[in-house]
Amino acid sequence: MNRNENIIIINCGSQFTQLIARRLREMKIHSVILNWDKTIDEILTYQPKGIIISGGPDSVNAPDSIMIDKKIFEIGCPVLGICYGMQLIAKVLGGEVNSEKSPEYGVTEILRTRESMLISSEKFNALMSHGDNVSKLPESFIETSKTQSGIISSIENKDKKIFGLQFHPEVINTEKGDEIIKNFVFEICRCSGDWNLSDWVESTIKNIKDTVKDKKVVCGLSGGVDSSVSAALVNKAIGENLQCVFVNHGLMRLNEPESVMEQYKNIGLNVIYVDASEKFLNELSGVTDPEQKRKIIGRLFIEVFEEEAKKIKGAEWLLQGTIYPDVIESGNKKGAALIKSHHNVGGLPEHMNLKLLEPLRDLFKDEVRKIGKIIDMPDEIISRQPFPGPGLGVRCLGAITKSRLDVLREADAIFREELKLAGLYKNIWQAFCVLLPVKSVGVMGDSRTYNEVIVLRAINSTDAMTAEWSKIDLNILDKISKRICNEVKGVNRVVMDVTSKPPATIEWE
């Protein structure tokens, strides 16, 4: 494998940036995401075969908008600008961008106007998401397609191999999107496409060794796939210098702390068990705001880790299982909007004495599972459904109490048990219950009840960036509802969440 065969992605704040990298990985092309303000010298250290400039929320005409160095177009490798990236190309190279025409959002028909090195189809549908548009081309550029409304949707400078797309080829809503990206990386950049996750594992283990050296790492295990794979990966790199800490925050599912500890023992991790459930519940008492909940849980996690780290001589690093969807939703990229903070990327106190180690930060969930298989982790861990770091704290809406958590735990166990009995559990990406701080009138026997509501949430996804709700057979749902109402004291109504992502997020908080 040619390890220097990189496509550099210049991130200008788009929430689609990582999807570009994902499409490249699917084509076995290695990519590196760099922030927009990286210098030319930093970019050149990667010996790029090509550069892709992402979209972003800014207007290129705004005085404080993201800008790139003009020298990017002088280093001799092909450049592709997407959406905001195309507008940057036009602006930087002497064209004009109009901020006054009507914006275009959603799927739009694209019409090819002349032969193109990127676009093969005469017409196709593509996702538009822009307010500005290119109104005057830079010198030596040609327009190769327009939208039905006459807005320029792609441009090219064939001699200098600089290309721009006003639409997003990286999203599934764009027809022929993969074909366009393939034309860029294979036909124009001349990539060979021989990168794979096995090579990523090898280079990441080496990088961890080089970064950590002989220092010790404290791993904040949550019991989920992400933190478990992170721990197993780092364990391969530094062995006994990894000290894992599993915190029972009182927000886990039924019997989960015991089963998780047994799994970690079986894969040979060195784990300290800390029961901090009382501490978490005390600090969460009366808190109803979801952002505040997440930040409290994140802060307490770090505090507990720090307390344990002080007992470990030479500990300098804190390992977390952060993956890219966490980063995107937490708005940590410049220009990216905050959707919700995640305990791995939000709520870190300024006085934290440990440096962060996040080897999975730029990967999607399905890639994390594949890595788990590559490093021979047991299927019972890597096939586990996603579970948020804050646990039931973000599924118990409203005030968190032990009694309400117990109600949620029992209902959730019934839901998952029935899905397993029906042979559906492994085919659903994520299935869980949510307890609402809403009471409704019911009747049991001859008595009136006034109890809380359980929501069933089941979704299918590949990377957690988008998700569709699962269409579970009504007879199975009927059985689940009856069991929960009959067996869980304090619940008299069960409803189903039939919302996809977007517009909803997977979790309710």
Image (cartoon, helix red, strand yellow):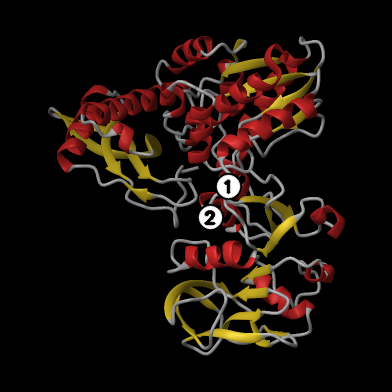
Q: Is residue 8 above or below residue 260?
A: below
Q: Residue at x 69, y 74 (%)?
A: 162
Disc 2 element: helix
The percent position of residue 300, horizontal first and vertical second, equals 66, 25
Q: Which quarter of the figure has residue 159?
A: bottom right
From the image, tell me which residue sits under label 2: 23
Disc 1 element: loop
Q: Is residue 51 above or below residue 275?
A: below
Q: Quick check: 303 left or right of 17?
A: right
Query: Number of numbered discs present?
Result: 2
Q: Is residue 76 above or below residue 312?
A: below
Q: Quick check: 302 left or right of 231?
A: right
The percent position of residue 134, horizontal first and vertical second, equals 65, 83
Quarter placement of the N terminus: top right
Q: Residue at x 52, y 39 (%)?
A: 367
Q: Residue at x 66, y 39 (%)?
A: 345
Residue 450 visible to the viewer:
no
From the image, tell me which residue sits under label 1: 194
- Which of label 1 and label 2 is nearer to you? 1
The percent position of residue 219, horizontal first and vertical second, equals 66, 21
Residue type at numbered disc 2: Arg
Residue type at numbered disc 1: Asp
Q: Nearer the viewer, residue 163 or 225?
A: 163
Residue extending farthest to the left is 446
The percent position of residue 382, horizontal first and vertical second, equals 46, 28
Residue 31 visible to the viewer:
yes
Q: Is residue 502 above or below residue 67?
A: above
Q: Quick check: 295 left or right of 325?
A: right
- The CA span between labels 1 and 2 is 14 Å
CB contact under 8 Å: marks 1 and 2: no
Q: Residue at x 76, y 24 (%)?
A: 317
